[in-house]
Every structure is written in structure tokens, then in C-alpha cells.
Amino acid sequence: MWAMLSRPLFLGSEIYRGSSYGPSHPLRVPRVSTVIDLARALGWLGPDQYMTSPRAKPAALTAWHTPDYIAALQRAEATQEARPEDIARHHIGTVSNPVYPEIYRRPATAAGASILAGELLADGGIIHSPAGGTHHGMPDRASGFCYLNDAVLAILSLRAHGARRIAYIDIDAHHGDGVEFAFGADPECILISVHQEKRWPGTGTLADDGGGHSHNLPVPRGLNDTEFAYILNELILPKVTRFAPDAIVLQCGADAVEEDPLSHLELSNNAHWSAVAALMGLAPRLLVLGGGGYNPWSVGRLWTGVWAVLNGHPIPERLPPEPEAVLRALEFKGNRRGRNPPEHWFTTLRDAPRPGPIRDEIRHGVGVLIRRDT
Ligand SMILES: [Zn+2]
């Protein structure tokens, strides 16, 4: 039905612009709208490469989520309140997963992008959906700012459109527990998650294999670019190459960079871009999702750079005036990092590299996972 995509496709929507989980929630900051504005200002996102994401229909969401939960999200959006059972059973109306104006439409739009991506990639290609990557969502409940699990829905859609073997790589600062719950025991999936140790949600220990096919590498605070390159080259790339997937889904959360206010890892955005560049070409289908990321400048710069890498655009040393103006217009209220942002958050996309020693704990973890025979 579809020909292979001739160029990478960006799935976005204007629903994310101005949408907020509330004034004190980490997801009060703009993210996808910044990427769209920056990429357009750089001349990288013409109408031929941008597609507006459809909103998934409730029936499509029940491919993984329960009908009761979808109905609860729709009801919460309509009434703007959570009933006691919504809180108790579905975990909506909590501090992490508040009721907000687009509580159904926004996640259903990110899910719509992921489902459409599975269809558009039927014959191969590359898609970037920075609104996706909501890897904590569970079938009957919200979790960790994620109401739906678009990554799971993407994998199901890829499967429904001809891809059998799926590699899911998750470089968010948090463990991709929802995706592991769905596919950790699936012999035709390989899941690799690199995340900060001893952090919420507490799953994803080195010993946790998710039922056989999940590889979890918890990493200590301060993860640096050299350590990330070691993990990429010694663990991720050999595992993915050996698995020979039909499709790769990369959850490219932007919360493992030093500037992130929620995590304590110290990558530069070069780490994420190197992962994107290395995974391109290891499978005929590549879907790059977003994920966490709570500093509006680092998220916008990182994901715009992902789009540049996917398209082979050189990243300018200094941004031209129009994209610089996009970054200067951002605000980060209620966070100390928003008070005096350093100049390079406005004038560059690329961070300075953050090299460092490779700690024994990381060598040990990579060694354990490499020896695991899947
Ligand atoms: Zn995260």
C-alpha cells in the first residue's frame, strides 16, 4: 500500500503548543513546539517532510489499553476532574499524572503518530515523532507523566504492517518499564534500556530480564559521553546487529543530559546524536521517539539535532538569528536554571562534549549483559 519513504518524515501537531500539565509540573515546559519552530527556522522542515499526527481513535488505543481506562481519560478531559476510582484504579488526578485540559487528546495524538508510523514504515524508512516515547504508560493506568504508551502501540502497529523482529532501545534517564511489561518476554523483541540506577520507577535492575528479552543497564550518577560511547559500541550496537531487527524503535528521552532538572546524568546531546547516527541503517525501519526531558532549552536543542542527524544536515557552529530567537523566547519558570541561562543555550544546538573515565560499574554491567545469550 505504501512505498518506502524517500526522506525522513516528522510527525507533529499543534496540540502540544501551549499545553501544560500545570504550573508546578515538570511538563509545564514547551517541547515539541520548540523542535518544530527550530527545525523550520533552520530550513529543515518543509511541508514535504512534516505530517500532522492524527488523533488515535479509542478503538485503536484498546490494542493495548483497557476500554475502561480510555473512557476514564475521555471523561476526565470532559469534566476536568478525576473521580475517586480514576485516582485509585487509573492513577489519573495524581500529582504526577494530573487532570489537565488535553489529558485525553494530547496523549491520543502522540499515540496516533506512533500507530501511523507503524503503517507508514511498512515498506521501510525513517520517522521522528518527538511527542512519543511515553514509555511508562500501563494498560489500565497512567504512570510517570505517561497516560498512554505510544511506544507499545508503535511496536504493535509495526508488527501489524509487516515488521516481525523489533529492537527497542531506550536511552531515557528512566527505565522503560511499560514497554518491558508489554514485550520483555517476547522472543521476537530485544529491549535495551540504559537508565539512572536507584531512581523511579525502581525496576530495570541489571538482573531484571523482563521475562527473557529485556537488557537493563542501570548507570550511576554522572554518566559521561565516554561511558555512553562505550555502552553504545560494546552493548547496544553488537546486540542490535546480531538480532537483525526488521524495525528499530529508539526512545530518545532528553533527560539524561547534564542540564536536566530531574535526573543526575551528565551526557551532552552528542551522546544521543551518536546513538541515532549509529542505529540508522541497522534496520530497514527506524522510528525515533522523544520521551523525558524537562529543561526547555536542552529538549528543543537535542531533538532538533536528532532531526538534523536523520537528514544528514550539518549542525551549524552558531545558530542564525531566526532559530536563536526561538530559543531566546523560551521561559523556564520556577527553576533556577531558567534565571540566567548560559549564552550557548541560545546560540547553539550542540553541547560541548562531556568526556570522562569509564567507571568499573559500567564495564561490569555491560559485561554481564553481553554474556547474556539473547
Ligand atoms: Zn525519563
Image: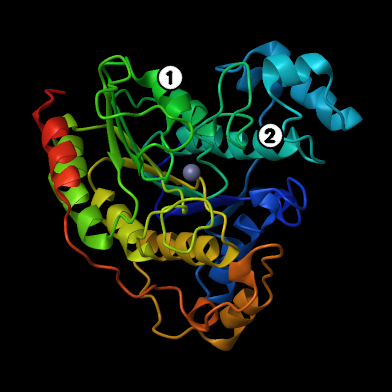
Front-most of residues 232 and 260: 260
The quadrant holding residue 208 is top left
Question: Identity of the amino acid at label 1?
Answer: Phe
| Residue 263 point in image, percent of width and height | 46, 51
The response on whether ligand 1 sits within 8 Å of label 2 is no
Question: Identity of the amino acid at label 2?
Answer: Asn
Foreground mark, 1 or 2?
A: 2
The quadrant holding residue 235 is top left
| Residue 133 point in image, percent of width and height | 50, 40
Q: Are marks 1 and 2 in contact (CB under 8 Å)?
A: no
Q: Secondary structure at mark 1?
A: helix
Left or right: residue 373 versus residue 308 is left
Residue depicted at x 50% and y 45%: 291
The reply to whether residue 13 is in sight is no
Front-most of residues 354 and 299: 354
Front-most of residues 123 and 338: 338
Q: Secondary structure at mark 2?
A: loop
* Mark 1 surroundings: few (<14), some (14-19) or many (≥20) residues within 10 A: some
User: Which residue carries the number 2 mark?
Assistant: 97
Q: Residue furthest right?
A: 79
Q: Earlier in the sequence, mark 1 or mark 2?
A: 2
The C terminus, quarter of image: top left
Q: Please tell me the numbered disc located at residue 181.
A: 1
* Mark 2 surroundings: few (<14), some (14-19) or many (≥20) residues within 10 A: many
Residue depicted at x 72% and y 12%: 68
Distance (Cα) linking label 1 and label 2: 19 Å
- Depicted 322 relative to depicted 244: above or below: below
- Depicted 178 relative to depicted 19: above or below: above
Residue depicted at x 69% and y 12%: 67
